[in-house]
Amino acid sequence: MAVLGAAGRMGSTTVRAVESAPDLELVAALDASDDLAKVAAAGAQVAVDFTVPSVTEGNVHALVDAGVHAVVGTTGWDDAARARVRDHLADRPDVGVLIAPNFALGAVLTMAFAARAARWFESVEIVELHHPDKVDAPSGTALHTAHAVARARRAAGVEASPDATEQSLDGARGALVDDVRVHAVRLRGLTAHEEVLLGNPGEQLTIRHDSFDRVSFMPGVLLAVRQVGSRPGLTVGLEHLLDLA
Ligand SMILES: NC(=O)c1ccc[n+]([C@@H]2O[C@H](COP(=O)([O-])OP(=O)(O)OC[C@H]3O[C@@H](n4cnc5c(N)ncnc54)[C@H](O)[C@@H]3O)[C@@H](O)[C@H]2O)c1
Ligand SMILES: O=C(O)C1=N[C@H](C(=O)O)CCC1
């Protein structure tokens, strides 16, 4: 196994988790100035990428070329980038890539519960709350949640949430993602948190998940590492490994 971004917050937590797993062996731990060729040279079958949005797609293509399965937690992926990986994998049917915006079990369940509830409420908005060192907004988890919620509402013929507000300042109502409002909070002391707010006349349902510590992501990361080799092609979201898709 190899870890990319090994000196970072998630990478270093992953290194510790792999070192504690009796069935896994860490053969390479790379950070920014390291040559990616070291991954295959060290004999890694799977690499975990927790780097930065600007480099993660390039890493994945290089891993696919080297025949190394990839588990990707780095955010910043859009449809076009995922499509490029899918196309590339068509030439390497022996390789699996799993990209998941969130490996915490509770976060994956939050997304599944929110998608299930979405059709039954007139209004839905998402608030994601993170530590202030996070480089991207909105979070990958909030984007994935918004698309899942929007898909469920479209399939049920539910209209966009009502909103008569005229913003007097740009951004006051957050970002519109697939017709769902997403708000991003950055606050010292936070780790990774998300609330899905669902409203009807006279009632509100709030689905909230809190990752207080990065160890919360590790069972999902290790599950993906163990399964990615038997899932050729591109898998997006840990829900596919948890029977929640
Ligand atoms: N999927 C999930 O469950 C999950 C959970 C937490 C964070 N994340 C995402 O993971 C990513 C990393 O988060 P973080 O908090 O660990 O960030 P971080 O800044 O602490 O770590 C990123 C690391 O990547 C390194 N890096 C940069 N370019 C590199 C390259 N070309 N090759 C190898 N390493 C390189 C940096 O030097 C740094 O050590 C972010 O996109 C974040 O949103 C995902
Ligand atoms: O700390 C971060 O950065 C996180 N990023 C992911 C996201 O953008 O959804 C997952 C939660 C933590």
Image (spheres, rainbow, N blue to C red):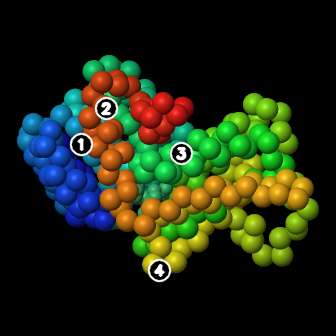
Give yes or no for contact between labels 4 and 2 (Cβ–Cβ under 8 Å). no
Which quarter of the picture shows residue 57?
Answer: top left
Is residue 102 or residue 6 the one in the foreground? 102
Q: Estimate how packed mark 4 is, as few (under 14), some (14 to 19) or many (20 or more) residues with alpha carbons within 10 Å.
A: few
* Residue that sits furthest to the bottom in the current view: 188
Which circle marks residue 188 in the picture? 4
- Give the residue number, with chain letter if any, for mark 2: 228
Label 1, label 4: how far apart the Cα atoms are: 31 Å
Q: Position of residue 216 (x, y in %)?
A: 38, 57
Q: Position of residue 84 (x, y in %)?
A: 44, 34
At label 4, which amino acid type do we have? Answer: Arg
Label 3, label 1: how far apart the Cα atoms are: 25 Å
- Give the residue number, with chain letter if any, for mark 3: 109
Label 4, label 3: how far apart the Cα atoms are: 26 Å
Residue at x 50%, y 46% (from the top left corner)? 108
Label 3, label 2: how far apart the Cα atoms are: 20 Å
- Above or below, 161 against 188 in this view is above
Q: Quadrant of the N terminus?
A: top left
- Give the residue number, with chain letter if any, for mark 1: 47
Q: Nearer the viewer, mark 4 or mark 3?
A: 3
Q: Nearer the viewer, mark 1 or mark 2?
A: 2
Q: Earlier in the sequence, mark 4 or mark 3?
A: 3
Is residue 6 or residue 171 the one in the foreground? 6
At label 1, which amino acid type do we have? Answer: Ala
The CB of the residue at mark 1 lies under 8 Å from ligand 1 = no
The CB of the residue at mark 4 lies under 8 Å from ligand 2 = no
Q: Estimate how packed mark 1 is, as few (under 14), some (14 to 19) or many (20 or more) residues with alpha carbons within 10 Å.
A: many
